[in-house]
Image (cartoon, helix red, strand yellow):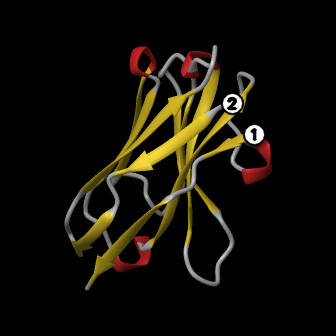
Amino acid sequence: QVQLVESGGGLVQAGGSLRLSCAVSGRSFSISSYIMGWFRQAPGKEREFVAAINWSRRTTYYADSVKGRFTISRDNAKNTVFLQMNSLKPEDTAVYSCAARSGGTIRYGPADYGYWGQGTQVTVSS
């Protein structure tokens, strides 16, 4: 059974920073062969793509709304994915979830990811 557990969320003022972590565990599961992504869902809104990184860490992709402010990274040896969020805005408030996708191509739809964490709340006050 694969488990993805996010941490690092919280309440922060606008302009502040947070670093989210996603620890992945599971028998014989290694994130080194998976695309890892972060998604977020605000109240009353659809889940939306935030960022993704491929297994080799050579390719990353970001939603336009976070480009230049967020950075996704991964530590394959520790089976952990990170999302560094800087210059946070109130509109970044949401539940942030990490996800894993098998295959070599980054995709941006939630349905393209087979494994999900339970999410961590990020609240940005103005």
> Is residue 121 placed above or below 57 in the rendered structure?
below
> Is residue 82 placed above or below 56 in the rendered structure?
below
On the rendered structure, is 7 left or right of 114? left
> Is residue 74 placed above or below 72 in the rendered structure?
above
Point out the residue furthest to the right here: 111
| Callout 2: SS | loop
On the rendered structure, is 30 left or right of 125? right
Q: Residue sitting at 45 percent across and 18 percent down?
A: 76
Question: The disc labelled 2 sits on which kind of residue?
Answer: Gln
Image coords of residue 51 (percent x, y): 52, 46
Give the residue number, with chain letter if any, for mark 1: 114
Please rate how many residues cluster around mark 1, counting C-alpha atoms within 10 Å: few if below 14, some from 14 to 19, many from 20: few
Image coords of residue 47 (percent x, y): 65, 65
Determine the image quadrant of residue 28. Answer: top right
Determine the image quadrant of residue 66. Answer: bottom left
| Callout 1: SS | loop
Instruction: Give the foreground label among 2 and 1.
Output: 2
Number of numbered discs on residues: 2
- Report the Cα–Cα distance between label 2 and label 1: 12 Å
Image coords of residue 56 (percent x, y): 52, 16
Question: The disc labelled 1 sits on which kind of residue?
Answer: Gly
Image coords of residue 46 (percent x, y): 69, 72
Question: Which circle marks residue 1 in the picture?
Answer: 2
